[in-house]
């Protein structure tokens, strides 16, 4: 394990086992998270993701991010383990209302509108991008994700991603766990987070399908002939590209192992 890869992966995966395509029952998702946080790869695990309606069922010692509607934000009871909220917005008015209800909480505002990122930043909130789903048309283009990343970098706006990032590198994979499930191009989570470290090349990094185009060592990472130092990776992970939500923790780990990176 190189230092650069360790820094890139640390606390990267927020576990969203309650959500599709896994769609687990709460007791199973809780059991899984507890197992993962005791495993050898616990350092890659981030928060437990739960909808507002079920957030009270989550053990108090789980670091928690709650997915809520705007209407639910103001009514959420304080929780000792609550570390962030995630809320959708489609307009400036939505963002301003979310900000008025935030009460100092860390809030990620999900939007597909790059221009809305300016208001999110002005209001002291964070951004969230949906990077896939259980249907092919739920996946935004790599260029759209790159544009989102570049805008966040320009605004010094922290962001997280969610959905469809089960695999490290862009690839064609089944969209669900059902037999004969349709396949589609899925974005790689390393593509997303390395693109955040190289925003000037984000569109090209998002299209990269060759895992050997990336290399990691003690001092940083390479993408072809582009270098990112460990110090810059640390800054990007702590200040810009924070985490991604995934209904599977085991798939990302298995793929990283298959590539020889874990």
Image (cartoon, rainbow, N blue to C red):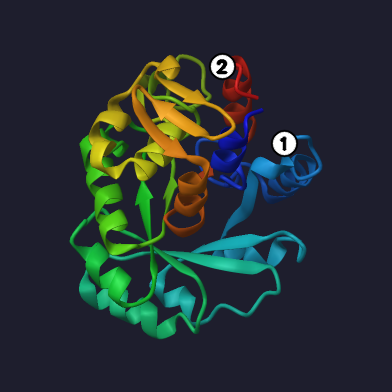
Label 2–label 1 contact, CB within 8 A: no
Give the alpha-carbon distance from disc 2 to disc 1, as whole Å: 16 Å
The residue at the point 22 percent across, 69 percent down is: 91
Residue behind mark 1:
41
Quarter where residue 54 is shown:
bottom right
Give the x, y percent position of residue 100.
Answer: 38, 85
Residue behind mark 2:
259
Determine crowd level at label 2: few under 14, some 14-19, many 20+ residues with C-alpha closer than 10 A: few
Quarter where residue 83 is shown:
bottom right
SS at mark 2 in the image: loop
Left-right relation of 106 to 151: right
Q: Which mark is residue 106?
A: none
Q: Vertically, is 118 above or below 41?
A: below
The residue at the point 47 percent across, 31 percent down is: 221
Asked if residue 167 shows in the view, the reply is: yes
Q: Residue furthest front?
A: 219
Give the x, y percent position of residue 250.
Answer: 64, 30
The residue at the point 54 percent across, 35 percent down is: 219
Instruction: Return the disc, 2 or 1, that comes first in the chain's sequence.
Output: 1
Quarter where residue 204 is shown:
top left
Left-right relation of 163 to 115: right
- For the residue pair 257 and 95, the one nearer the viewer reads as 257
The residue at the point 28 percent across, 26 percent down is: 207
Q: Quadrant of the N terminus?
A: top right
Determine crowd level at label 1: few under 14, some 14-19, many 20+ residues with C-alpha closer than 10 A: some
Asked if residue 133 shows in the view, the reply is: no
């Amino acid at each position: 394990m190189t230092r650069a890869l360790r820094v890139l992966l640390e606390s990267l995966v927020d576990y969203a086992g309650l959500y599709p395509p896994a769609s687990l029952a709460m007791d199973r998702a809780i059991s899984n998270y507890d197992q993962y946080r005791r495993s050898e790869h616990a350092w890659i695990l981030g928060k437990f993701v739960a909808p507002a309606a079920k957030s009270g069922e989550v053990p108090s010692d789980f670091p928690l991010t709650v997915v809520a509607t705007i209407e639910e934000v103001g009514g959420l009871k304080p929780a000792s383990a609550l570390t962030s909220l995630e809320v959708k917005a489609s307009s400036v008015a939505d963002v301003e209302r979310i900000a008025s209800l935030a009460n100092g909480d860390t809030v990620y505002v999900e939007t597909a509108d790059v221009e809305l990122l300016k208001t999110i930043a002005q209001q002291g909130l964070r951004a969230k991008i949906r990077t896939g789903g259980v249907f092919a048309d739920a996946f935004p283009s790599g260029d759209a994700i790159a544009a989102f990343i570049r805008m966040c970098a320009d605004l010094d706006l922290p962001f997280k991603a969610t959905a469809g990032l089960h695999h490290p590198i862009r690839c064609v994979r089944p969209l669900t766990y059902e037999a004969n499930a349709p396949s589609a191009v899925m974005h790689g989570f390393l593509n997303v987070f390395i693109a955040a470290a190289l925003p000037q090349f984000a569109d090209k990094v998002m299209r990269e399908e060759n895992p050997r185009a990336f290399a990691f060592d003690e001092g940083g990472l390479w993408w072809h002939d582009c270098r990112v130092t460990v110090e810059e990776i640390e800054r990007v992970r702590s200040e810009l590209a924070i985490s991604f939500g995934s209904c599977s923790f085991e798939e990302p780990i298995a793929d990283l192992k298959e590539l020889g990176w874990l």
